[in-house]
């Protein structure tokens, strides 16, 4: 995927209405009217969102008689996932190091707590 295609995909995904449309299409084809139902938007407004999704390659529109059902196209989403994978590995490594550091701090705190308790016990016995 070229950086321009990636930018186009991310721009299309930036809008919550378009993400909701994609979520709906993940369960199967839908007409423009069906896609517009949950939104307080006009059909032309929904059509504009669909054009953005089409330009990004995220959906296609077919033709069945007078209907133009929309269908999710997963290719660009796979490309985004592949691009993000590099960063996921990077953050996983960082989180693993943070986990190690937090465990070390907890061990030190437990050790310090035990020593304090022993010292307090000795002071009390004297």
Image (cartoon, rainbow, N blue to C red):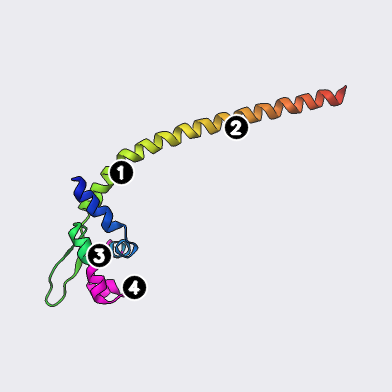
Give how far apart the Cα atoms at labels 1 and 3 are: 26 Å
Which quadrant is home to the N terminus?
top left
Q: Secondary structure at mark 2?
A: helix
The span shown in magenta is 24-48
Residue 32 at what x, y percent from top left?
23, 73
| In this rendering, the label closer to the viewer, 2 or 4 | 4
Q: Which residue is mark 3?
A: 28
Alpha carbon distance from label 2 to label 4: 50 Å
**Pointer 2 residue:** 106
Q: Residue at x 23, y 68 (%)?
A: 48
Give yes or no for contact between labels 2 and 4 (Cβ–Cβ under 8 Å): no
* Quarter-of-image position of residue 61: bottom left
Residue 39 x %, y %: 34, 73
Q: With respect to residue 116, does 20 lie above or below? A: below
Proximity of marks 2 and 1: CB atoms separated by less than 8 Å: no
**Of the image marks 2 and 4, the number of the one nearer the N terminus:** 4
Please name the residue shown 46% across and 31% down the image. 97
| SS assignment at label 3 | loop
Tell me, yes or no, whether the highlighted magenta stretch contains residue 63: no
Q: Which residue is mark 4?
A: 39
Q: CA distance from mark 2 to mark 1?
A: 32 Å
Q: Which of the two marks, 2 or 1, is nearer to us in this view?
A: 1
**Residue 79 in the figure: left or right of residue 38:** left
> Looking at the image, is mark 2 or mark 3 nearer the viewer?
2
Q: Position of residue 70 (x, y in %)?
A: 20, 67
Q: Which image quarter holds the C terminus?
A: top right
Instruction: State which tag comes first along the sequence, 2 or 1.
Output: 1
Q: Which residue is mark 1?
A: 84
């Amino acid at each position: 995927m070229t950086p321009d295609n990636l930018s186009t995909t991310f721009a299309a995904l930036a809008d919550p209405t378009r993400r909701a449309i994609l979520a709906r299409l993940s369960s199967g084809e839908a007409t423009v009217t069906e896609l517009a139902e949950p939104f307080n938007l006009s059909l032309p407004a929904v059509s504009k969102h669909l054009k953005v999704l089409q330009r990004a390659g995220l959906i296609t529109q077919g033709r069945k008689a007078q209907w133009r059902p929309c269908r999710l196209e997963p290719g660009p989403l796979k490309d985004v996932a592949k691009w993000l994978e590099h960063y996921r590995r990077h953050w996983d490594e960082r989180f693993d190091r943070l986990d190690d550091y937090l465990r070390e701090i907890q061990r030190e705190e437990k050790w310090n707590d035990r020593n304090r308790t022993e010292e307090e016990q000795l002071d009390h016995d004297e």
